[in-house]
Image (cartoon, rainbow, N blue to C red):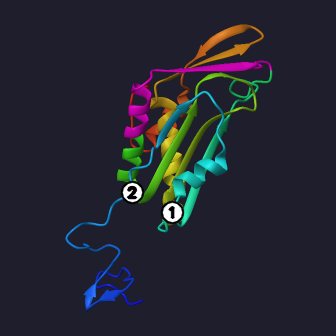
Amino acid sequence: MAGCPDGGWRSEQLNGQLAACRNATIIGMQEPQAPPRARVFIQRSDFDLAHEVAQLRAGDARVGAVCAFVGTVRDRHAGAAVDRVSAIELEHYPGMTEKAIEAMIDAAHQRFDIVGARVVHRIGLLQPLDQIVLVAVTSMHRRESFLACEFLMDYLKTQAPFWKKETTPGGARWVDARESDDAALARWGLNLPNA
């Protein structure tokens, strides 16, 4: 196999004519592009980290780094041992939530040199130890993946339209964003009101 002028590959030559070349026009047409991959999933069911990362990486040889964050349900609120949490319930605004997270992923693409990103967020009734959220980012090099993953998680904590209710021995209560979440977002230069 010989190389194409554009650095791709050539599978064969017919009568001196290029038969197939990656990254080149073939018989007047562009090589078909893969359909865009879904990036945001809001669901009641649990997710499998390995499956989600495999889907994000699928067939993309540019990927040299994957960074993933998985958030889980704690059995206490803000670390207080006396404030045991027996369950949380997450609600969202269908359509609006997905659109907001898509915009966050677009912002990550603008700030960082990443290849792809995927966010899976659960809703409904969840128990301690259950997985809540996955943020996974791919890039050519690790630094960009680490930064973009952290940026997306900080953004999600205050800007994604989710509502969380915790159940404790003292009853159920709605949970507001914490000041530390606002500070985490502000360090990226984003001083936005909570969603």
Residue 38 placed where, x, y %? 45, 44
**CB within 8 Å, label 2 to label 1:** yes
Figure check: 21 above or below 162: below
Figure check: 182 above or below 118: above
Residue 174 placed where, x, y %? 59, 14
Figure check: 54 above or below 47: below
Foreground: 79 or 47? 47
Residue 160 placed where, x, y %? 46, 30
Please identify the quadrant where the C terminus is shown: top left
Foreground: 163 or 102? 102
Rendered image: mark on residue 23: none
Going from N to C along the chain, the mark reached first, 2 or 1, is 2
Q: Residue furthest left?
A: 28
Residue 118 placed where, x, y %? 50, 46
The segment highlighted magenta reads: 82-103
Tell me, yes or no, whether the highlighted magenta stretch contains residue 46: no
Figure check: 134 above or below 4: above
- Spatial distance from mark 2 to mark 1, Cα to Cα? 10 Å
Q: Which residue type carries mark 1? A: Gly
Tell me, yes or no, whether the highlighted magenta stretch contains residue 99: yes
The secondary structure type at the circle numbered 2 is: loop
Q: Which residue is mark 1?
A: 59
Q: Which residue is mark 2?
A: 34
Please identify the quadrant where the N terminus is shown: bottom left
Q: Which residue type carries mark 2? A: Ala
